[in-house]
Amino acid sequence: MTTHAAALDTSTDTRAALPYATLLAFTRYVDRTGPAKAVFVGKLRRQRETGGGFNPHSQLVKALKNDIEFGMDGTHLAAVRKAVNPRWSRLYDALTAGATRYLRSLGEPHTAHLTQVNDALAVIADLPVRVSAHFGLRYDDGRVEAVRLHFDEEPPTTELVTATLHLMRANMDQILPHGTPVLVDVRRGVTHRVEPGRVGEISRWLFGEAAGFAAMWKTPAVTQ
């Protein structure tokens, strides 16, 4: 995956001083209420300073993309489910079933094919947010989609879906020109798409959320 996002200084001092969020982190923040927001930002800041974090979903994403690319009916998903580290077996049992349902929703034979996506760097109320998709799809009928995957045990809330799709749509010129954003709830194989209207209202809401995120990041008390 290539990126149009501006390069960020990754030194420890800079990471500690400057607020910054990925799309995943920002939408998870938006989805929290009350004191849980400050706790979340504090944990995120400490993780950024120490360089911690691990993505257990990378093999699942690769298998799903391979099945799409080669027009398979879940062959790669089934293989990764068996080959994954035993530590992640239960997770992959839950994810591969839903991912296979999503894969089959693309048609048999598949009417969608992988296409390249780019990262975008959005600045909302002085908060840089890296907005990205997991992959792009180009359909035989000319439609183009930028696909973001949701892996959590709980279904995405209305707030999380709204924030994710709005930020992707607002930055689609960089992510995938002429594309439309899609959020796939992987465990359930359910696809969420943008609903028309409310763009200005959602933008104002996210501006306020971003301002709050940045303020909490800069407050030492939230990191204790």
Image (cartoon, helix red, strand yellow):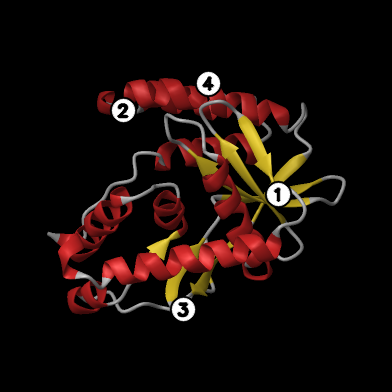
Dot 2: element: helix
Q: Is residue 98 above or below residue 149?
A: above
Q: Position of residue 11 (x, y in %)?
A: 22, 76
Q: Quadrant of residue 176?
A: bottom right
Question: In 3D space, how far apart are the residues under numbered discs 3 and 2 (Cα atoms)?
Answer: 34 Å
Q: Mark 3 or 1, which is nearer the eye?
A: 1
Image marks 3 and 1: residues in contact by CB distance under 8 Å: no
First in sequence: mark 1 vs mark 4: 4
Where does label 2 land, which residue? 88
The one of 9 and 221 positioned closer to us in this rendering: 221
Q: In the image, what residue occupies the spot 62% across and 31% down?
A: 190
Residue at image point 49% right, 40% down: 61
Q: Which label number is shown at residue 97? A: 4
Tag on residue 86? none
Q: Amino acid at mark 4?
A: Ala
- Which numbered circle lies on residue 6? 3
Q: Residue beneath label 1, please?
A: 194
Q: Residue furthest right?
A: 141
Compared with 90, 173 (above or below) is: below
Quarter in which the C terminus is drawn: bottom left
Q: Nearer the viewer, residue 118 or 22?
A: 22
Name the residue type under label 3.
Ala
> Mark 4 packing: few (<14 Cα in 10 Å), some, or many (20+)?
some
Callout 3 environment at 10 Å: few (<14), some (14 to 19), or many (20+)?
few
Mark 2 vs mark 1: which is more N-terminal? 2
